[in-house]
């Protein structure tokens, strides 16, 4: 893996004069390593019920103004089935930390969804080793959990009653159970320094992650951080581009939060390092209730509309839509070998 010094990373993140060169370099590395395919993931937001109280998050347990919902097992499986029919080869199941969904229930759901010939990614936060193991055995392929920040003091201020070390240990467990490991951070958190963002990138490289997302923090009016400034698209894109230089072969999404700040945010991201997009396939009635941050895009769209729109956008910049499961290339290569033997 390419080695960069923290000083170099900070320089890339800060220097306006270098931005164009950084974006071009990240785009070239993406093209050379992964080609022009953009992999799509169908994102199902299946519950906004959360036992945690993260200061930045719109669906934090303490936000009494949120109307709570959770999909039943049947609805969840049906949503995944519809997404698979639309051509999605990866289903991402994301939720708040909702313990109603026990390992037994989730394993049942995963087993059913795996029958639709898709890769399954879980993004449901911190669970026990036994639970992670059970999900994996039920067929879950990938796990997505952002470390959010590696500044432990900041983490503990923003995520009361949670432990940074524990989240880190969860990521190691997930990795060691053979999942494709996804993580990531937010940029522009109140009190977060550029040095700390550089540390975050080096941390993600050290895990190492198979996929990682960078999102700008967007203040939610019903949270204690309502009056904070929030992250800029510029910093999010730069951070993402540097991440591409640090890890040429990982999967990097053009994140939804980027598009919430700019109508072309995701296309811009695809042109400076990203190779993945996660269109929302959640039923329209639930989308607005899964409001992590305000101005979330595509609130009134259906899964079909999102799939069509994103397909056109991807084509408009001369890229193609991935036809495989779109895992990390090391897994794709391993599968190919297995099939040849
Ligand atoms: N409960 C799961 C899913 C969390 S929601 C878990 O713990 O992993 C997915 C991501 O949304 C979070 O990891 C966080 O990085 C991001 N997010 C939450 N609130 C946000 C905000 N106000 N602005 C931008 N991103 C936010």
Image (tube, rainbow, N blue to C red):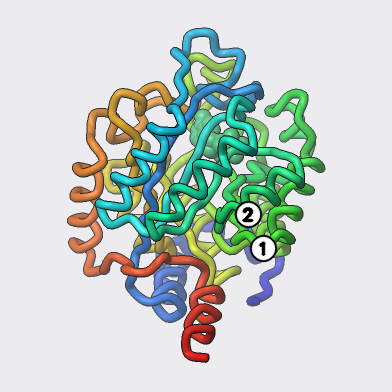
Q: What element carries label 2?
A: helix
Residue 121, how many percent across, how many down? 51, 51
> In which image quadrant can residue 69 be found?
top left
Instruction: Identify the image quadrant of residue 291.
Output: top left
Can you give x and y, in whole percent of width and height, for residue 292 in the image? Answer: 48, 28
**Location of residue 53 in the rendering, given as x and y in whole percent from the top left corner:** 65, 21
Disc 1: which residue? 178
- Mark 2, residue position: 136
Q: Earlier in the sequence, mark 2 or mark 1?
A: 2
Q: Which of 84 and 49 is in front in this view?
A: 84
Where disc 1 sits, the SS reads loop
Q: Please indicate, yes or no, whether residue 318 appears anywhere in the rendered image.
A: yes
Residue sitting at x 72%, y 35%: 155
Q: Answer left or right for 15 relative to 314.
A: right
- Residue 14 falls left or right of residue 164: left
When the figure is inspected, residue 105 is found, relative to residue 87, above or below; the finding is above
Contact between marks 2 and 1 (CB within 8 A): the answer is: yes
């Amino acid at each position: 893996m390419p080695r960069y010094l923290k000083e170099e990373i900070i320089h890339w993140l800060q220097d306006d004069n270098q931005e164009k060169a950084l974006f071009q370099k990240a785009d070239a590395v993406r093209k050379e390593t992964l080609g022009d395919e953009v992999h799509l993931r169908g994102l199902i937001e299946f519950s906004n019920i959360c036992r945690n109280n993260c200061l930045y998050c719109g669906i934090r347990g303490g936000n009494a103004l949120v109307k709570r919902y959770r999909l039943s097992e049947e609805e969840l499986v049906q949503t995944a089935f519809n997404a698979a029919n639309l051509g999605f080869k990866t289903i991402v199941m994301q939720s708040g930390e909702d313990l109603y969904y026990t390992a037994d229930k989730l394993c049942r759901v995963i087993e059913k969804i795996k029958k639709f010939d898709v890769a399954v990614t879980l993004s449901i936060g911190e669970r026990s080793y036994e639970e992670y193991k059970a999900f994996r055995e039920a067929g879950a392929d990938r796990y997505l959990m952002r470390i959010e920040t590696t500044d432990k003091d900041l983490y503990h201020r923003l995520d009361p009653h949670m432990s940074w070390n524990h989240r880190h240990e969860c990521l190691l467990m997930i990795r060691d159970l053979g999942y494709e490991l996804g993580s990531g951070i937010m940029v522009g958190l109140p009190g977060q320094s550029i040095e700390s963002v550089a540390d975050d990138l080096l941390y993600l490289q050290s895990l190492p992650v198979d996929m990682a997302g960078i999102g700008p923090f967007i203040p939610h009016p019903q949270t204690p951080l309502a009056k904070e400034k929030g992250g800029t698209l510029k910093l999010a894109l730069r951070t993402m581009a540097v991440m591409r230089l640090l890890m040429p072969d990982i999967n990097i999404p053009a994140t939804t939060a980027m598009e919430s700040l700019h109508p072309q945010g995701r296309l811009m991201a695809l042109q400076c390092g990203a190779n993945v997009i996660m269109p929302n396939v959640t039923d329209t009635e639930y989308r607005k209730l899964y409001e992590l941050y305000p101005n979330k895009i595509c609130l009134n769209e259906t899964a079909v509309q999102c799939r069509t729109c994103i397909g056109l956008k991807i084509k408009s910049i001369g890229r193609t839509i991935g036809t495989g499961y779109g895992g990390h290339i090391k897994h794709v290569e391993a599968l190919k070998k297995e099939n040849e033997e």
